[in-house]
Amino acid sequence: MMVGSALRQVTRACFYLLSKASHISRGHQHQAWGSRPAASELAAQAAPGHVVELLGKSYPQDDHTNLTQKVLSRVGRNLHNQQHHPLWLIKERVKEHFYKQYVGRFGTPLFSVYDDLSPVVTTWQNFDSLLIPAHHPSRKKGDNYYLNRTHMLRAHTSAHQWDLLHAGLDAFLVVGDVYRRDQIDSQHYPVFHQLEAVRLFSKHELFAGIKDGESLQLFEQSSRSAHKQETHTMEAMKLVEFDLKQTLTRLVRHLFGDGLEIRWVDCYFPFTHPSFEMEINFHGEWLEVLGCGVMEQQLVNSAGAQDRIGWAFGLGLERLAMILYDIPDIRLFWSEDERFLKQFHVSDINQKVKFQPLSKYPAVINDISFWLPSENYAENDFYDLVRTIGGDLVEKVDLIDKFEHPKTHKTSHCYRITYRHMERTLSQREVGQVHQAVQEAVVQLLGVEGRF
Ligand code: PHE
């Protein structure tokens, strides 16, 4: 009973705060809240045998379902396809750059562009196809949005690599919205956009003009010694790595101008080796903007391109746009405020945009403390819940105090929630109502003991 009324309250709060109609139909509004058993029981109880309906398809709920109203309301917005939106603008500039720089044999663009693939993918596409092991931490329910055990909102555009390779493509870009459960601050939002690129090379392309014909035996089983084969593969990988870094350096110089300082940092992805991150220097601070690497041969082979070797990269569009235009808060990308959007209405996509930040309206800060339940408390469940109830009024949530009671050994968390509207001044009264809804919901849905 109590749980039911809390859910209704939350659902009401969401509908009140969401500016756009949700994509789940009425009667299917009840969603699980995360990984706590109580929360999933709740979903099952509220919706026996129910389904999540998304983009015209139905997905039966199960113990993995953890989508929130808030996130569902973002699916299908496709900011990257909205003309003159800053994310669209960057996509168009990258596309144009690739079209011009990389021309195929018949004068046609080498790279094909996919910006309309459904964000609903299978866990196989998002993880297994990329050689991500069965129990890899990146699969955690706490970090992803699952529709159910087999389907999820893609956590990266790499989820499409295998299918497009399997379809026989050698060079492509994928642009799309990606979804990750995360902390809340001006740089993080549960939905953001990535641009992925993949390029495969044949042995002929790789060694054309560089090596003697001998090296063309690269991947072939020949009588050559294993050692020699290995050396050739290493050489090929070096050439691919060189091409990758050159491609990316040209791209960011095209976007940011020649003065830009960049550096490469070694890193690890299960689907590339070697792997790198590119960082760019922004006002003296090094910021990571993309991940990339030479594709694991096992992946390329399994997709049916045994005779090829290639590179892949995935870059974060919001990150790039925030640096390029000095956009201070990631929530602005979702704003429908003309004062924001009209600044990107340029007639030529390469025209320089001088972004004028909107004046900041004052923040209203409210703290919340509670004793954690003895088990199954996940911070991301709390962040999702605050996001769902507070919507875009929530600028950030900071864990400001942790405390363990010396006798009971119970742990208390205190979070500071900063509420701010991008387009007007909020009153404490208005925020108070939202904050109270948060307090009630955490008690009922996350099983904490309030210290309000
Ligand atoms: N998919 C990776 C991420 O989201 C980025 C990446 C793409 C890395 C392609 C390597 C190759 O972090």
Image: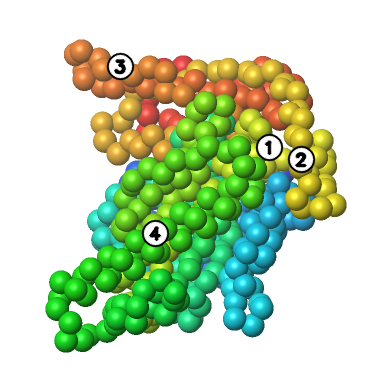
* Among numbered discs 2 and 3, the one appearing first in the sequence: 2
- Give residue 231's position: percent from left, percent from top: 23, 68
Amino acid type of the residue tagged 2 in the rendering:
Val
Q: In terms of sequence position, does the residue under pointer 4 or pointer 3 come before the other? A: 4
Pick the front one: 51 or 185? 185
- Which element type, helix, strand or loop, lies under badge 4? helix
Q: Nearer the viewer, mark 1 or mark 4?
A: 4
Amino acid residing under circle 3: Phe
Along the line of sight, the residue nearer the viewer: 224 or 260:
224
Q: Position of residue 45 (x, y in %)?
A: 43, 53
Label 3 SS: strand
What colour-coding does the image apply?
A: rainbow
Name the residue rendered at 65%, 39% in the picture. 324
- Distance from disc 2 to disc 4, alpha carbons, whole Å, reads 33 Å
- The residue that label 2 is drawn on is 353
The answer to whether mark 1 and mark 2 are in CB contact below 8 A is: yes
First in sequence, mark 1 or 2: give its number: 1
Mark in front: 3 vs 1: 1
Assess whether mark 4 and mark 1 are in contact (beta carbons under 8 angstroms). Answer: no
Q: Which residue is mark 4?
A: 241
User: In the image, is 95 to the left or to the right of 214?
Assistant: right
Q: CA distance from mark 2 to mark 3?
A: 47 Å
- Whether residue 299 sits left or right of residue 100 in the image: it is left
Mark pair 1, 4: CA separation: 30 Å
In the rendered structure, which disc, 1 or 4, sits on the residue that comes first in sequence?
Answer: 4
Which mark is first along the chain, 4 or 2?
4
The residue tagged with tag 1: helix, strand or loop? helix
